[in-house]
Image (cartoon, grey):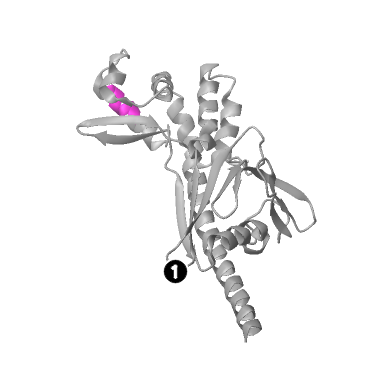
Amino acid sequence: MSIAPIVHSTTVKAPPARAFELFTKHMGKWWGVGQTLGQSPHRDMVVEPHRGGKWFEIDANGKELRWGTVAAWEPGSKLLLHWQINSKFAFDPDFSTDVEITFVAAKDGGTVIRLEHRNLERFGAGSQKLVGMLDTGWIGHLGAVKNYIDAQN
Amino acid sequence: MTYSSAAIKAFSALGDATRRDIFQRLASGPSAVGDLAKGLPITRPAVSQHLRVLKEAQLVTESSEGTRHIYRIDPRGIAAMREWLDAHWAKSLDAFKNFADAEFETENTIQKEKDK
């Protein structure tokens, strides 16, 4: 089962190198207030500037909340983030979807930024869990399935 | 805790042994009505009837490939998550554009002042 990736793009006036820097170094400044996991408003969104780096928010109380991992760090051209927030809005180190952001020079000196969030079917690991519950016998698992279905609604 | 009408529908739909069987078969891959009927001791119209109930309960989805109706598991939860992420990224990129363009304009203005 595969789910269509989410793709969005925009064009900014800054050249690729600067656009990349504004996107990564100042993420906390443009990230939507309330679009975070912890106490709002967030203090910062941090993307550690290297492959394998952490991607996390610092909430209003100064608490660090992990979002994912930097999978590719190519200043001025590409950023690949592993989004590790599952469908219950919790960080899960065993869960990962790809958010790829590319920066391409536009004709007027600006930058075309394209964002693709893919492997979305992985959010549905829960459906396989439901099937697994059925496999092990329906009766006796009704409670677990109820919890599962509630979590989806 | 209250159960939503969707959850109640899913329960009653899966309360039937044949429907559970059909649902489990679809879990291993999409299938057409005819192919599902071949592996079951019931008629094709009966399979269609069960699929209709599963579809109403949002447990399976239907799509047409030519004259064939293909059924597959409805990725419950994924659709809602995808919708949320889609809106999230659209808003985020807009916000980034506003922020980045304002920053760049400011930097340019400061540079021009210096060059004067």
Residue A18, placed above or below residue B22: below
Magenta region, mostly helix, strand or loop? helix
Q: Which residues are magenta?
A: B46-51
The answer for which chain carries disc 1 is: A
Q: Residue at x 56, y 64 (%)?
A: B95
Confirm whether the magenta stretch covers residue B45: no
**Secondary structure at numbered mark 1:** loop
> In this rendering, does residue A32 appear at all?
no
Q: Residue furthest bottom?
A: B116
Q: Count the marks: how many? A: 1
Q: Quadrant of the C terminus of chain A?
A: top right
Q: Nearer the viewer, residue B42 or A71?
A: A71
- Does residue B107 lie above or below B76 as drawn? below
**Residue A118 locus on image (x, y percent):** 49, 42
Identify the residue at image location x=64%, y=62%: A33
Image spot of residue A28 (x, y percent):
67, 60
At label 1, the amino acid type is Asp
User: Picture coordinates of residue B31 (x, y %)?
Assistant: 32, 25
- Furthest residue in direction right, as rendered: A62
Which residue is more in the foreground, B87 or B58? B87
Identified at 32% across, 14% down, the residue is B39
Q: Residue at x 57, y 61 (%)?
A: A19
Give the vertical position of B106 relative to A151 (above or below).
below
Residue A2 percent across, percent down from the top left: 43, 35
Up-down: is B105 above or below B77?
A: below
Q: Which residue is mark 1?
A: A108
